[in-house]
Amino acid sequence: MRRSVVFLTLLALAAPFAASASVSSPGDGSLSVRDLNGQITVLAKGTVIGRCDQCTLVLDERLGGDELAPVVSGTRGVDTDDDGAKERFVGRDLRWKVIGSSFRMVVRQGTDVDLSLVGRGQVRNLHGTSGTFVVNAGETERVLPGTAFAFTLGPPAATP
């Protein structure tokens, strides 16, 4: 009896981890950016979590994409296209997340930007005066170049 109770308890504890493991699909790529002083533009379908000491952040759904419901803390947003949703955020100590949507994210004039992204899409205009990035978990961490570059985010074979 005790063994079955222990087994069922362990099974119940493991269930959320097993469910979260199926969130990303095999064709998804990942991007991790640390300590970026610069800017980045992402057009993707997936999930992003980020923060900055100071930046201008634009979050909007992509054309034909799902309705976007970002969670942003640290400032009030501005509705730039009169659709009733706030897309532009400016301030200090911003934190944001977008989960499971098709989105456009632009970070401009960023200071100490950290973000993690899982999904498929395009990364454009990534550059800065400092910071590092990793494309696809397990790859080598690289220093951000001073000039802008772009790449496709997808399966591990799509690294820049």
Image (tube, rainbow, N blue to C red):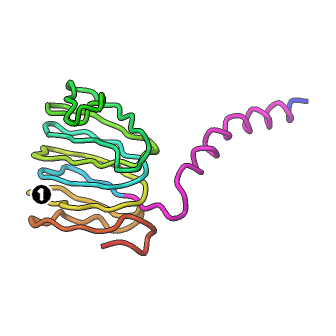
Asked if residue 8 is positioned above or below residue 159 in the image, the reply reads above
Q: Is residue 157 left or right of residue 86?
A: right
The residue pinned by badge 1 equals 128
In the image, residue 53 lies in the stretch drawn in magenta: no
Front residue of 46 and 1: 46
Front residue of 105 and 19: 105
Quarter of the image where one finds residue 68: top left
Front residue of 29 and 12: 29
Quarter of the image where one finds residue 93: top left
Total marks placed: 1
Front residue of 4 and 95: 95
Magenta span dominant secondary structure:
helix
Asked if residue 9 is positioned above or below residue 127 in the image, the reply reads above
Asked if residue 101 is positioned above or below residue 131 in the image, the reply reads above
Q: Residues within 10 Å of mark 1 (few under 14, many from 20)?
A: many
Q: Residue furthest right?
A: 1
> At 37% from the left edge and 51% from the top edge, which residue is drawn?
117
Report x, y in % for residue 27.
50, 64
- Which secondary structure lies at badge 1? strand
Quarter of the image where one finds residue 58: top left
Report x, y in % for residue 142.
24, 66
Which span of residues is magenta-colored?
Answer: 4-30
Q: Is residue 125 left or right of residue 71?
A: left
Give the amino acid type for the residue marked by disc 1 in the picture. Answer: Gly
> At 12% from the left edge and 50% from the top edge, which residue is drawn?
37
Report x, y in % for residue 66.
44, 44
In the image, residue 13 lies in the stretch drawn in magenta: yes
Q: Quadrant of the N terminus?
A: top right
Report x, y in % for residue 20.
57, 44
Q: Quadrant of the C terminus?
A: bottom left
